Amino acid sequence: MEIKIGIADVARELTIHTESSGDDIVDSLSRALENGSLFEITDVKGRRVLIPAARVGYLDLGATESRPVGFGAL
């Protein structure tokens, strides 16, 4: 799933590809906002991204499946 995150006072959005579901991401952000802690996401390569939850402006949850590209795509 592709997730785009808007962060306050940052001109560019952050794009992350993750295997987590949209519901898991929303739940994680909700818990981080309640606790005043960091919002953590792990991408498909295993890298962890930590963002102060209070600085998250928006989440754009993309489609769960990607379109096939190339000669083998039907």
Image (tube, rainbow, N blue to C red):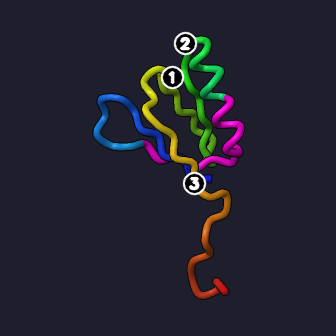
Amino acid on which disc 1 is placed? Ala
Q: Is residue 3 magenta?
A: no
The residue labelled by disc 3 is 62
The residue labelled by disc 1 is 53
The part of the chain drawn in magenta is 14-27
Residue 5 location (% of width, % of height): 47, 40
Q: CA distance from mark 1 to mark 2?
A: 7 Å
Q: Which mark is residue 36?
A: 2
Q: Secondary structure at mark 3?
A: loop
Circle 3 residues within 10 Å: few <14, some 14–19, many ≥20: few
Vertical placement of residue 29 versus 3, above or below: above
Amino acid on which disc 3 is placed? Gly
Q: Is residue 25 magenta?
A: yes
The answer to whether the residues at label 1 and label 3 have Cβ atoms under 8 Å apart is: no
Residue 12 location (% of width, % of height): 33, 43
Residue 39 location (% of width, % of height): 56, 25
Amino acid on which disc 2 is placed? Gly
